Amino acid sequence: MANTLLSPNTIAMEAQMVLHNNSVMLPVINRQYDPSFARDGAKIGYTLNLRLPNRAVVNKGSAMNIGDVSETSTPLTVNTQAHVDFTFSNSDLTMVVDEFSDRYLKPFMGKLAAQVDADVLALAASKVYNQVGTANITPGLTGGTVGDFSDSSAPAIFLSAGNMLDNFAVPTQDRYLVLNPKAQALSIKGLSGLFNDQETLSNQFKYGRMGHALNFDFAMSQNVFRQAIGTHAAASLAAVQVTGANQTGTSINLKGFTASQTGVLKAGEVIRFVGVYSLNPENQKSTGELQQFVVQADANSDASGNSTVSIQPPITVASASLATATVTNSPADSAQCYLDSYQQVGVAAGTTLPINVAFHKDAFILGTADLILPNGVHFAAREHYEGVSMNIISQFNISDYTMPTRIDVLYGATCLPDRCVRIAG
């Protein structure tokens, strides 16, 4: 029986499935495909506005008090064109698809999957402000204050992550937890004997994977982002304070840093202020926990040790008619600023530490769009699978009788930060 040549669509669909199976994040996050470019193809820089859930204000009494509907959206820019490039011979198209996949697709699509995972997980450093654990203490080890969100021991640290998601009214279904390899190993050790059924214990022993526990599906990724630590590590704990009362918005003036330092705070570090508490988004009442803020850009100190720090979320004080408030009140003048994961110090400036993440499925959103399919090539195909669009293009090279080939994905990713919690490591 004569061999049948593999079609470009068959190769593209197999590549899609290999990508999905090799990615940690793609199967567990919100994926959105924009079909508007199905004919002509999109270009880098296209922006899709994603509508966020409305937040209402509850009124009491018989009188009607119609307020403005607080409709918000977040932009998702399709700004990353990632691709893998390889070559094969024309005779390789006579392989069965499994052979072709083993030889070409699995090695290359694994690299592409790792890149997508890394891009999504990096959002935890720039977007997510809620954090549990203690810097430089791997989850699963004893560290931090027992009974506090800084406790790094298992299961306390994962229960704290769930607690923080609950504080922000995150749905209890579809929660996931992604750890770096060391954190996974120590967490399995710390959790393996805690009331697990025999099948779970057996799988932990056989495969070294945690599985489902504590209302999270556990997963491991080598692509967990690593956060750099600023020069504040050498500063006195009580030295850094707010300078000026009634500050609101996306920046805060601080004092007490070592004078004339570059990078006293690094983008992605988390800070808190004494007396400033977070709000439950459903009822706008205090959670009883200090609101955390993530630094948006590297901050330097001036000759007097002052620094203006860009932060998220914005300091928006609660009021009876405001549905998007973030805090109970502004920090007072000279209020102490807590630095770096619940006052952990002694970590050398420039050290990088892993940011593990606990999140709801909708915390991360990945959007893809169709790329242009060119004419005048040997073959070109596009396939969609589970909300992801992928192109494969191949052109015959007459000089050495090979088929230079590229597989491309055009995507962008964003994050809803209150649906995710960083786990310091």
Image (tube, rainbow, N blue to C red):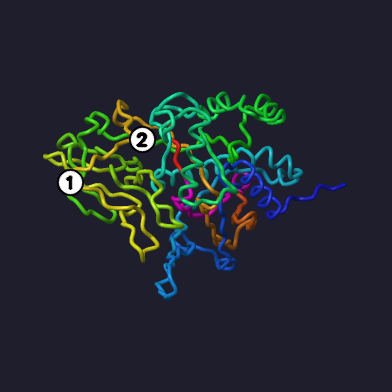
Q: Residues within 10 Å of mark 2 (few under 14, many from 20)?
A: many
Residue 407 is a magenta residue: yes
Quadrant hosting residue 391: bottom right
What secondary structure prevails in the magenta region?
A: strand
- Determine which residue is flagged by label 1: 243
| Residue at x 40% of width, y 74% of height | 65
Q: How many marks?
A: 2
**How far apart are labels 2 and 1 at the CA level?**
21 Å
Please name whichever residue, 136 or 348, is drawn nearer the observer in this view of the structure: 136
Q: Is residue 92 left or right of residue 163?
A: right
Q: Residues within 10 Å of mark 1 (few under 14, many from 20)?
A: many
Q: Is residue 310 left or right of residue 106?
A: left
Q: Is residue 16 above or below residue 140?
A: below
| Residue at x 54% of width, y 48% of height | 360
Earlier in the chain: of badge 2 and badge 1, it is: 1
Residue 382 at x, y percent in the picture: 63, 58
Q: Amino acid at mark 2?
A: Ser
Which stretch did the figure color magenta? 398-420
Please name whichever residue, 214 or 345, is drawn nearer the observer in this view of the structure: 214
Q: Amino acid at mark 1?
A: Thr
Residue 212 at x, y percent in the picture: 63, 37
Check disc 1 and report its element: helix, strand or loop. Answer: loop
Residue 211 at x, y percent in the picture: 63, 35
Residue lying farthest to the right in this orientation: 1
